[in-house]
Image: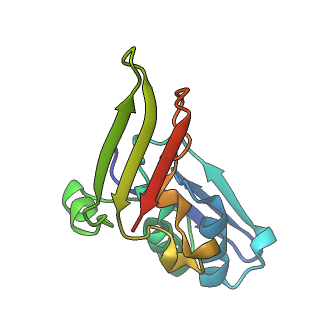
Amino acid sequence: MEPQNCTAHVRADSCDVWAPTQNQTNTQAIAAKITGLDPKAVFVHTTFLGGGFGRRFETDFVAEAVEITKAVGGPVKVTWSREDDIQHDYYRTASHAHFTAGLDANGWPVVWINRIACPSLMARFGPLKDNLDRRSVEICDSIPYAIPSILVIIR
């Protein structure tokens, strides 16, 4: 897995950002905010991810590169050390899931109950629809098996 990295180049009328990001919208927005440019003048070039797992949804490494290129007046590439990457990561708090299944006479699952207790991953980005963070529990209620009765309880 690669550490956080970003290449950026700010000019008077535009900004280019090359980053392995999972969040192009906020990458563009943070670069526009730092540079004072219209978001339409910020171009995000998404590079391949060397393992993101949600960490590359954050834009802190992008902001750092844009701040530096703005200050030095030329293109820069920022690559975090492994130590910096681990020290400044966004760790998820613990979650708990408890599964219960009911089987028919032939041993096929007919009931699937999934009880989940977890914090929201997305609440810090704004209000949640129906006060439910669907990203924290995605796929729990749409498992790819033909089970007639599925219940997901989220706390």
Quadrant containing the C terminus in the rendered view: bottom left
In percent of width and height, residue 78 lies at 41, 61
Camera-side residue: 4 or 134?
A: 134
Which residue lies at the image location 40% right of the left edge and 57% below the top edge? 55
Q: Quadrant of the N terminus?
A: top left
Picture layout, residue 104 above or below residue 77: above
**Where does the image place residue 70, in percent across and percent down from the top left?**
56, 78
Residue sitting nearer the eye, 19 or 95 = 95
The answer to whether residue 43 is left or right of residue 101 is right
The total of numbered circles placed on residues is 0
Residue at horizontal 24 percent and vertical 64 percent from the top: 84
Q: Is residue 72 visible?
A: no
- Quarter holding residue 73: bottom right
Identify the residue at horizontal 73%, vertical 80% (top origin).
37
Residue 26 in view:
yes
Q: Quadrant of residue 26?
A: bottom right
Across and down, in percent, residue 32 comes to 67, 77
Which scheme is used to colour this image of the protein? rainbow
- In the rendered view, tell whether residue 70 sits above or below residue 155: below
The residue under the point 29% across, 50% down is: 98
| In the foreground, 152 or 65 | 152
- Left or right of residue 150, residue 81 in this image: left
